[in-house]
Image (cartoon, rainbow, N blue to C red):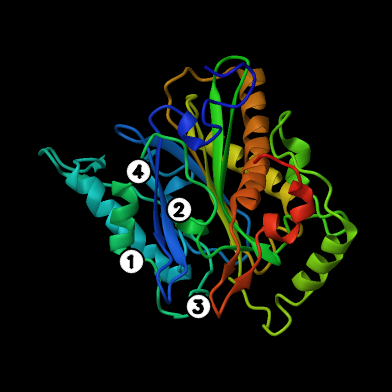
Amino acid sequence: MADVPGPGPTNSLTDVPGVRVGHATRREPGWLTGTTVVVAPGAGAVAGVDVRGAAPGTRETDLLEPENLVDRVNAVVLTGGSAFGLAAADGVMQSLYADGLGWPVGAGAGEVVPIVPAAVLFDLGRGGAFDHVPTAQDGRSAYEAASAGPVPQGNVGAGTGARAGGLKGGVGSASWVLEDGATVAALVAVNSFGDAVEPGTGLLPAQRFGYPGELTTGIPNEVEVRAARERAATTYAEQPLRPGLATVIGVIATDATLTKAQCRRTSGLGHDGLARAINPVHTLLDGDTLFTLAVGDRPSPELPALHALMVAAGDCVTRAVGHAMLAAESVSNGVTDLRSYRDAFPSAFAGASA
């Protein structure tokens, strides 16, 4: 049981009861991509979305507008592969259908249509083969792997081929239990055009928002900071700027009862959390997209509690970015050469036990 307020038992998205997370990770020769699925419990969760990046790749986001009919989703897919990767959602949809889960459209048993919004990030070619992208089978594999246990982070699922500015990105997650007992949590796949590291210090901006003992490192030395800055400057030097090169995608979840409009507003504050951790964010080159799922195990919060939940959601997103950067591992496959935060700034971890 978590101290209140404080992080949940696993400090990840699955601290929200009933929510499951699964990854399909492709790192074999020629591949560096993957798919992450967030599965809602039972009949689904009320959902909203906020898209801030100018180059998004999405599915079923119009359905989540507050004025539209369907108010529940069964899963959310986050995937690499740019627009090709949307095929992974088909596999999740078929798996849900096989389990009898979806929006009822007929009187007979099994007459349902699973509702599976999705968002993609750009990682094409980072494994070596441009056309090695997630497929429906990867969606099925991620769904089958979905668990209520601690969320694996770093170079997994949608974060497998992710890049964060000039460093390796990845999947990160964080949670918070509020004073009233409600839980809110976030999971992000960090593939940003902007940096998640302060260029002058080498510190993660997200560290300022960690609870005591979370996201803690030493201060990198000046030699490493300068070398990292120079290396980052060459990351895009030989590439023309094109829309869709980047993107941070993610899911916020809570056990509170929220409306679609409140879910959308929560996603909006989640984007504030991105802005605290990444600079620049929401650019012409990013497709930044955040979904919010409300499981509804707890009552609708009154205004003060709702405000506190939304603020905590933004902080969870910031902290999740920090966890993604700390969990990421370096990649050098002959095509992509990206150092992790830990390898770029080893002095920050000198003498650390973690």
Q: Residue at x 73, y 49 (%)?
A: 277
SS for callout 4: loop
Mark in front: 1 vs 4: 4
Q: Residues within 10 Å of mark 1 (few under 14, many from 20)?
A: many
Q: Which residue is mark 2?
A: 62
Q: CA distance from mark 4 to mark 3?
A: 27 Å
Ranked by sequence position, the earlier of labels 2 and 1 is 2
Local crowd at mark 3 within 10 Å, few (<14), some, or many (≥20)? some
Instruction: State whether residue 227 is above or below residue 96.
Output: below
2 or 3: tag closer to the N-terminus: 2
Residue 269 lies, in percent from the top left, at 66, 40
Between the C-alphas of marks 3 and 1, the distance is: 15 Å
Q: Secondary structure at mark 2?
A: helix
Q: In the depicted view, which residue is nearer to us: 354 or 53?
A: 354
Instruction: Kindly identify which residue carries mark 4.
Output: 146
**Rendered location of residue 190, percent (x, y):** 60, 56
Above or below, 300 relative to 24: above
Mark 2 vs mark 3: give the one in front. Answer: 3
> Which mark is in front, 3 or 1?
3
Badge 1 element:
loop
Quick check: can you spot residue 204? no
**Mark 1: amino acid:** Thr
Judged left or right of residue 220, residue 168 is: left
The amino acid on which the numbered mark 4 sits, given as a three-letter code, is Ala
CA distance for labels 2 and 4 = 26 Å
Q: Nearer the viewer, mark 2 or mark 1?
A: 1
Q: Which residue is mark 3?
A: 125
**Distance of label 2 from label 3 (alpha carbons):** 30 Å
